[in-house]
């Protein structure tokens, strides 16, 4: 039965009419031949087609009442193969034979089809199935020697105890045939029963038994006192309504109560069916996950009732914007999903997703207030990204959050950007245990002025996995950021770095240390207070600590970030702006951030000596920073030419492989710290001397990369040759290199900010 005319659109259950057109045609053809043959033989043999007199008119009236009830309430008479008409059909079959019963079914098909023209095809199929069930039950009766007709009815008064198995078997056969055929008609090809049928199976079975149990009573009244037959309309309609309510409740489990759209359970089952069909056809299917940006602000500002009305408008827009064959569901909150059963490729699915996002971005009117919402969408394609419905939904979710983070609107799933793979989840657990066990190390890379003095050190985190070996910082830091482990990692790095600074200061070595922090750290309530508490606990003055941040800290919650940074500078902690010139670099951000140092990103420094545009960018950046009273540090310095150009541009300090790689604390000699404080001007000892070969410029690390160390106080930092590490120098980006910053020229691909790693 159709649950209600006011429910979600008919398309919400689309896809469960699973009979192929050819099979459907065969079913209708067989039923037509069966009924036509029966009518011809009945007429040819001189039998009546339907009882006359009081019994005939009473049965006709009862049939009309039931049909009127079904049509008036918009219910489909044959849903599930049982209903109020099923008991009447079975009663006529037992008393007068299968031809009159088939005529009852045919009359209902014609009347319901006339009243509801848009469902005539479904009504014709259900009527054909009903006639096949009647024929199967008639064969059972014939096997027991009972072939009733209008002239020689099988009177219930003549039934004995031996007739009970015949009646039960005939009724069960009728119910079984109609059930199986209709369930197969509603089940997707290659799939199981629809969720509605599975959920309501027990309740429908009990009601069906009650309906069919009334059939023998109808038989008795039809023979003994037919004038009372119309009174059976009351219990039949009541039981029929109970059956409909059972189905409606089952269907509610598949529908979102607010928007009327299908829900997550329906989506998963429909997606399974679409994937099986795509596998059979060798085609693709896609799933688009859509989430509204900043929808929480609408609820917080206008209230949840206004938010609900807005979601209704969003649902209507999605329905209207769907391409042909696509289906939409609401997963909860402000999340929607669109299934594209016949996607040609990931590109076409992405194009559909962009169209849907653009439609949702159009202005919306809410109580006279014009709102403009934005949405982010993630796309996952079968079989490229997943082979099952749950996997496809999860990967679309990953892509959607990537689109939110990058503010790109739409993203297609990429496995390399998914931090939730089993391998990376295992790595996350190992990282957590390594932090608890103190197995993560800090390496320190100097920032050196052009007079040879060490201006400070940058702490870079390194992790050697007991089984995988050295893990690139980009890899495990991205996992920490996406999993919520980032605050724990930041606390570990701060604690370890401040403990080391305290030990150096106790030895008379006074050199500031810089630690990278992520936007999540800055947005954590109480972060400034926790940093001040750690400084006090280790006895380290605030001027000995510098925190490196990126402009990303101002993107998500600018006010909280500003309060945290103001608190840090209020405690005396210096701030450095890292990666300047990339991402969302803005003069407004530079004005708002309380920084004392600016670090030029290595992507500009690496080509400084050979690219005039990069050289001009670096020059302008240095002049701008100096005009604002900021110190400038250039990252990724690898060769003499770059060194000389930066010195001519009056850069304050440099950092990179030419100066020194990042090294563990045990390889650092005390003299360098004193040199940072006492060294005077002059030419650095590691600079090019007369007769010394000029270092070659190349992309990889130098063959024998320098270590930074000095002798007694007053001697500046100099470069020394030392053997390559096992396996040779490691190429890669600054954060990805196991030895730290200033690797090969050219900026490596990196996602998000780079706390604790890049020099």
Image (cartoon, rainbow, N blue to C red):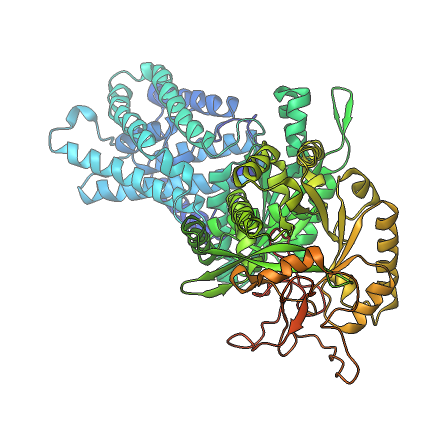
Decide: is 691 above or below 509. Answer: below
Decide: is 253 above or below 389. Answer: above
Q: In the current view of this chain or complex, which residue is farthest to the bottom?
A: 691
Decide: is 512 above or below 643. Answer: above
Quarter of the C terminus within the rendering: bottom right
Where residue 79 sits in the image (x, y, percent)?
Answer: 42, 34
* One can see residue 44 in this view: no
Where residue 456 sits in the image (x, y, percent)?
Answer: 67, 54
Left or right? Give the position of 192 relative to 727.
left
Residue 458, picture quadrant = bottom right
Q: Nearer the viewer, residue 68 or 558?
A: 558
Q: Residue at x 64, y 20 (%)?
A: 303
How many tags in the picture? 0
Q: In the current view of this chain or complex, which residue is farthest to the left?
A: 161
Q: Nearer the viewer, residue 354 or 8?
A: 354
Quarter of the N terminus within the rendering: top left
Left or right? Give the position of 561 relative to 178.
right
Residue 115, picture quadrant = top right
* One can see residue 427 in this view: yes
Where residue 625 sits in the image (x, y, percent)?
Answer: 84, 49
Q: Residue at x 59, y 65 (%)?
A: 737
Where residue 380 sits in the image (x, y, percent)?
Answer: 57, 53
Q: Nearer the viewer, residue 72 or 624?
A: 624
């Amino acid at each position: 039965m159709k649950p209600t005319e006011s429910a979600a659109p008919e398309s919400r259950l689309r896809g469960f009419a699973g009979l192929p057109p050819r099979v459907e045609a065969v079913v209708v053809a067989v039923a037509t031949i069966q009924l036509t043959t029966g009518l011809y033989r009945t007429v040819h043999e001189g039998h009546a087609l339907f009882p006359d007199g009081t019994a005939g008119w009473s049965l006709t009236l009862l049939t009309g009442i039931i049909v009127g009830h079904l049509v008036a309430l918009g219910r489909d008479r044959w849903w599930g193969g049982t209903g109020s008409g099923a008991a009447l059909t079975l009663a006529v079959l037992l008393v007068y034979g299968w031809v009159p019963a088939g005529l009852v079914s045919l009359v209902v098909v014609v009347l319901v089809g006339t009243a509801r023209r848009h469902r005539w095809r479904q009504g014709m199929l259900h009527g054909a199935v009903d006639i096949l069930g009647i024929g199967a039950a008639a064969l059972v009766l014939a096997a027991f020697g009972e072939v009733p007709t209008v002239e020689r009815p099988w009177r219930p008064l003549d039934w004995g105890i031996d007739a009970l198995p015949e009646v039960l078997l005939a009724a069960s056969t009728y119910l079984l045939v109609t059930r199986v055929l209709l369930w197969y008609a509603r089940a997707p090809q290659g799939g199981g029963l629809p969720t509605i049928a599975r959920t309501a199976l027990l309740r429908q079975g009990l009601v069906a038994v009650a309906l069919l149990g009334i059939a023998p009573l109808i038989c008795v009244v039809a023979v003994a006192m037919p004038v009372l037959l119309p009174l059976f309309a009351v219990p039949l309609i009541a039981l029929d309504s109970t059956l409909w309510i059972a189905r409606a409740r089952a269907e509610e489990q598949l529908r979102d109560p607010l928007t009327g759209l299908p829900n997550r359970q329906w989506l998963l089952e429909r997606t399974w069916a679409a994937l099986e069909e795509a596998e059979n056809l060798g085609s693709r299917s896609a799933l688009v996950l859509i989430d509204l940006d900043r929808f929480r602000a609408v609820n917080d500002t206008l209230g949840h009732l206004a938010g609900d009305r807005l979601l209704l408008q969003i649902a209507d827009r999605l329905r209207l914007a769907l391409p042909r064959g696509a289906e939409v569901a609401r997963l909860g909150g402000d999340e929607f999903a669109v299934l594209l059963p016949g996607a040609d490729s990931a590109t076409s699915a992405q194009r559909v997703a962009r169209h849907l996002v653009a439609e949702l971005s159009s202005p919306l009117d809410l109580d006279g207030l014009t709102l403009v919402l934005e949405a982010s969408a993630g796309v996952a394609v079968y079989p490229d990204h997943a082979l099952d419905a749950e996997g496809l939904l999860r990967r679309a979710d990953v892509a959607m959050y990537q689109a939110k983070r990058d503010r790109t609107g739409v993203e297609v799933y990429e496995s390399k950007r998914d931090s939730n793979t089993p391998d990376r989840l295992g790595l996350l657990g190992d990282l957590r245990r390594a932090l608890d066990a103190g197995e993560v190390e800090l390496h320190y890379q100097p920032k050196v002025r052009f007079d040879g003095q060490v201006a400070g050190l940058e702490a870079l985190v390194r992790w050697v996995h007991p089984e995988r070996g050295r893990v690139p910082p980009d890899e495990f830091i991205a996992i920490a950021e996406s999993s919520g482990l980032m605050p724990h990692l930041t606390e570990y790095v701060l604690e370890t770095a401040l403990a080391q600074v305290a030990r150096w200061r106790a030895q008379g070595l006074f050199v500031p240390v810089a630690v990278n922090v992520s936007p999540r750290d800055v947005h954590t309530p109480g972060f400034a207070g926790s940093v001040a508490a750690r400084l006090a606990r280790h006895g380290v003055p605030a001027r000995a600590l510098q925190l490196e941040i990126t402009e990303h800290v101002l993107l998500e919650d600018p006010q909280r970030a500003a309060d945290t940074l103001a608190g840090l500078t209020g405690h005396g902690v210096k701030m450095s702006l890292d990666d300047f010139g990339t991402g969302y670099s803005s003069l407004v951000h530079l004005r708002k951030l309380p920084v004392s140092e600016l670090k030029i990103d290595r992507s500009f420094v690496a080509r400084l000596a050979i690219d005039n545009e990069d050289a001009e960018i670096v020059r302008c950046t240095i002049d701008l920073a100096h005009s604002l009273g900021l110190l400038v540090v250039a990252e990724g310095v690898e060769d003499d030419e770059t060194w000389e150009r930066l010195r001519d541009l009056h850069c304050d300090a440099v950092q990179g492989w030419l100066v020194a790689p990042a090294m563990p604390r045990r390889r650092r000699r005390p003299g360098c710290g004193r040199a940072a404080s006492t060294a005077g001007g002059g030419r650095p000892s590691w600079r090019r001397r007369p007769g010394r070969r000029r270092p070659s410029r190349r992309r990889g690390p130098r063959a024998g990369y320098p270590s930074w160390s000095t002798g007694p106080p007053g001697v500046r930092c100099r470069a020394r040759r030392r053997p390559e590490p096992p396996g040779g120098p490691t190429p890669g980006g600054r954060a990805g290199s196991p030895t730290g910053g200033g690797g090969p020229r050219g900026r490596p691909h990196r996602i998000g900010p780079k706390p604790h790693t890049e020099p």
